[in-house]
Amino acid sequence: MNSPKRVWDSLWVNVHLATMNSGDGYGEVIDAAIAVRDGKIAWLGPRATLPAGFQATHEHDGRGAWLTPGLIDCHTHIVYAGNRSDEWEARLNGVPYEQIAREGGGIVSTVNATRAASFDDLLRASLPRVDALAAEGVTTLEIKSGYGLDLPNEEKMLRVARTIGHRADLTVRTTFLGAHALPPEYAGRADDYIDDVCQNMLPALAEQGLVDAVDAFCESIGFTPAQTERVFQAAQQCGLPVKLHAEQLSNLGGAALTARYGGLSADHLEHLSDEGITAMAAAGTVAVLLPGAFYFLRDTRLPPVQALREGGVPIAIASDCNPGTSPMTSLLLAMNMACTIFRLTPQEALAGATINAARALGLSASIGSLEPGKNADFALWAIDRPGDLAYAMGFNPGTEVVKNGVLCNGPRARH
């Protein structure tokens, strides 16, 4: 008796797969094929083992390319208005940051520009940054608010982020970062502002379906652990997961606090303690490392990468695209920096931009690795081996990007 034919929407052949699902190594499959049906991966394996009698509506020749999961940038502040290159130049010319801040610079500058921008202005400014990431094979992107710092402008930022998700060939996950900084109108009244975040802003934005997760900046120049915990409690009441900017400048125990609330991730982590690592490992909280900010700020204290490895904490990598401390729109460059500066291996860097980044967004069941049943989000690369993705600085070897099984439009490098 003949077995029923397999009918697929599309089939990619003459590719090498880096499945990223082995837990150790790239999960390589040489001379492979991958099939898509209804936007999901239907089958994958060595080309020689393709099932007999299959049918594919569209068949694509990968021309020997490497095929990886679509990249995931799990920490960005990519929606903002204004430009702070003048401050950067001033600092390099010896002007102290404190003076720049007194003269209206720093995050206040971005808040003022973002508040003054219309929805259309903000969308127009953000799309080129998003396009730059998408051109490098990014198929999922986290976008934080946090430059509005009041309800109308936080809502505006999050609506722009949602619109980007509809306009671009990628998935956008939104994060409410109302507790990013103290707005000028609340100077000296941080607890009152946290009241506004918890009692007014977050419930209203969550009710409108604009928030996928909640973040805060727990630091001496941000908010205290007690204030951060109030934000986490408000998120919990809204049924939303949490994450945190933690241990970037000092150790306030933010990573352990995040773990206590089952947080998706703790990010930055240059001053992370052993206790924080133990708590994160127990909770499954991902460590998101941000080498762009480390580089741009000329930091000298490295995150404890070896201790994270030994503790079994998953490590993700992100661009941290923002105007003040990481004006970077290249996840490939972030991967290179993670290897060169933080001493990650190329395999760890690719895992950090795929399967572990998916975990940091709570999406590992659907994206981040090449497995049947997961979304057909993948990228093709004209490279000799997967490690090349973290090797070349400032070069994009991408040839094609596929989102939900559909070939994305736009310029790509060719073989």
Image (cartoon, rainbow, N blue to C red):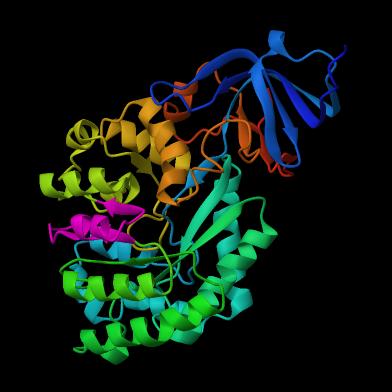
Please indicate whether residue 391 sits to the left or right of residue 228 in the image.
right
**Is 190 rendered above or below residue 50?**
below
Which of the two residues, 220 or 27, is positioned nearer the viewer here? 27
* Residue 256 lies in the magenta-colored region: yes
Residue at image location 63% in from the left, 41% down from the top: 375
x, y percentage for residue 371? 58, 30
Residue at image location 46% in from the left, 37% down from the top: 355
Which of the two residues, 280 or 218, is positioned nearer the viewer here? 280
Q: Quadrant of the N terminus?
A: top right
**Is 380 rendered above or below residue 48?**
below
> Which residues are the magenta region?
243-268
Which of the two residues, 280 or 387, is positioned nearer the viewer here? 280
**Is 89 rendered above or below residue 350?**
below
Number of numbered discs overlaid on the protein picture: 0
**Is 97 rendered above or below residue 286?**
below
Q: Quadrant of residue 311?
A: top left
Residue that protrudes farthest toward the front in the picture: 1
Residue at image location 66% in from the left, 55% down from the top: 168
Q: Quadrant of the C terminus?
A: top right
Can residue 299 be seen from the camera position used here? no
Please indicate whether residue 218 sits to the left or right of residue 56 in the image.
left
Residue at image location 63% in from the left, 75% down from the top: 120
x, y percentage for residue 376? 66, 38
* Residue 318 lies in the magenta-colored region: no
